[in-house]
Amino acid sequence: MPLSDNTKFGVRALSAAINRVPAKPTQIRDLALFEAKSLTTTYAEVENQDGTLVLIQSKPRGSTGDSLQQKKRQTRLFQIPHLPIDDVVRADDVQNVRGFGKEEAETVEAKVNELLGEGKESIEFTREHLQLGALGGKILDKDGDVMYDLYKEFDLKRQTHTFALSSEKTEVGALIDKVLADQRKLLKGAMTSGWVALCSYDFVEKLKYHPSIKAMYERYREASVYREGNKEAINPIVFEHNGVKFIHYTGEFGTAADIKAGEAILLPVVRGMYKEYFAPADMVEFVNTMGKPYYASREKAKHGKGWELHMQSNPLPMVLRPELVSTLKMS
C-alpha cells in the first residue's frame, strides 16, 4: 500500500480505529468500578461534602424547630494528566516486509494498526496504574511522583485494619464482620452493593488457609470447579467470604502504587463513588469538546518518508469518598 494522502488515516478515523483495538485485560476494569465521565475542560472540579444525619428533638406543636446543621463543603480543582505517545511508520519499515502470517507484502495500514494496538496497550496499562493509585489514596506518575494525595486534598484519614492471621486463634469471619461494621459507620447514607478486597499474594494465601476458614475455602473452591471449571489454575485467586470478595491483584508497576506484601485494599462497591474523568485532546478540532478515552492522528514525515503517529489519552481516576476505602494489614 503506498504512503498516500487518502482520508483513511484522518484524525477521526485513527481515533475510531484505536477505539476498536481490544483493550488489554486489567483487573480493576473488570470490576467495572470506575464510571467514565467526559469533560470539556482540562481539569476536574471535585466537591466533597461532609453531611451527617441528626436526631430531631420533639417540641410542642406550633413552636420553632431546630435549624439543620450546615454541611462542610470543600472544592478542589484537579488538573487532568496528559498521556501522549509519538511514533513513526517509515517507508523502510514496510518496504520488502512480508505481512505477519501472510504471503502478501506488509501494508502501511497494517503497520499503523499494529502501532495503534501497542499504543493502546500502553495507555491501558498506565490507566490501570493511575486507578490503583487512586484506590490506594495517591495518584502517581510513572516515575512514582505523587500527583495527588486524596487524603491530604480533603483533609481525611485512611482507616487501617489489622488481620492477625499468624494466630490460629483468630476468628477470621468475626474479624471481617467487625471491619465491615466499622466501615459501614462511615457510609453516611451511601448504598453499597458489596465489598471487594484487592490483595497481595501473601495476604490472600494466608487468609484462605487460615484454620478458621480453610475448610470453608476448600468447599468454595470445589463448588467453583463444578460451576466454572478449574479457572484458579490460570486466573487470579477469587474467594468470597462474609460478604467480601478477596481477589489476588497481580498487577505490578514498580512504583508505590503497588499493593505491598501482606496488605490489601478494602473498598465498597458504591454507585457514583469512583469516576474516571476524560479531558479533550490538545488538538484544534477538539477544543472544548467532550473528552474521549483515546485519540490518534497522523502527519506526513518530511520528504514523504513515512508517517508520524500521535496517540493520547487524558484520564483522571478519582475516588470521591476516599474515607470509605481502607487498608488491610496482616500480622
Image (cartoon, grey):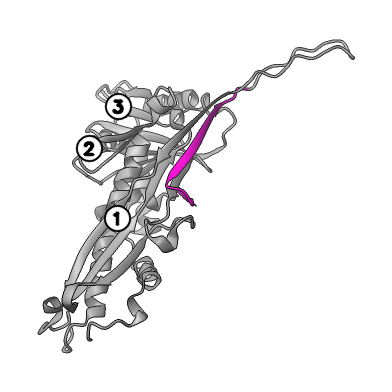
What is the C-alpha distance between the residues marked 2 and 1?
17 Å
Residue range corresponding to the magenta coloring: 35-52
Callout 3 amino acid: Lys
The one nearer the camera, 286 or 67, is 286
Residue nearer the viewer, 304 or 177: 304
Dot 2 and dot 3 residues touching (CB under 8 Å): no
| Residue 53 placement (x, y as % from top left) | 64, 22
Q: Earlier in the sequence, mark 2 or mark 3?
A: 2
Question: Residue tagged by mark 2?
Answer: 144
Numbered disc in front, either 1 or 3? 1
Q: Is residue 218 visible?
A: no
Tell me which corner region of the image, top left, top right, bottom left or bottom right, holds residue 263.
Answer: top left
User: In the rendered image of this protein, does residue 133 appear above or below residue 234?
Assistant: above
Dot 1 falls on a residue whose secondary structure is helix
Q: Is residue 11 left or right of residue 301?
A: right
Residue 123: give its label.
1
Given residues 320 and 176, the one toward you in this image is 320
Mark closest to the chain's N terminus, 1 or 3? 1
On residue 98, the disc is: none
Quarter-of-image position of residue 64? top right
Q: Quadrant of the N terminus?
A: bottom left
Prevailing SS of the magenta stretch? strand
Look at mark 3 in the image and give the residue it sits on: 329
Q: Amino acid at mark 2?
A: Gly
**Left or right placement of residue 49 versus residue 97 in this view:** right
- Asked if residue 114 shows in the view, the reply is yes
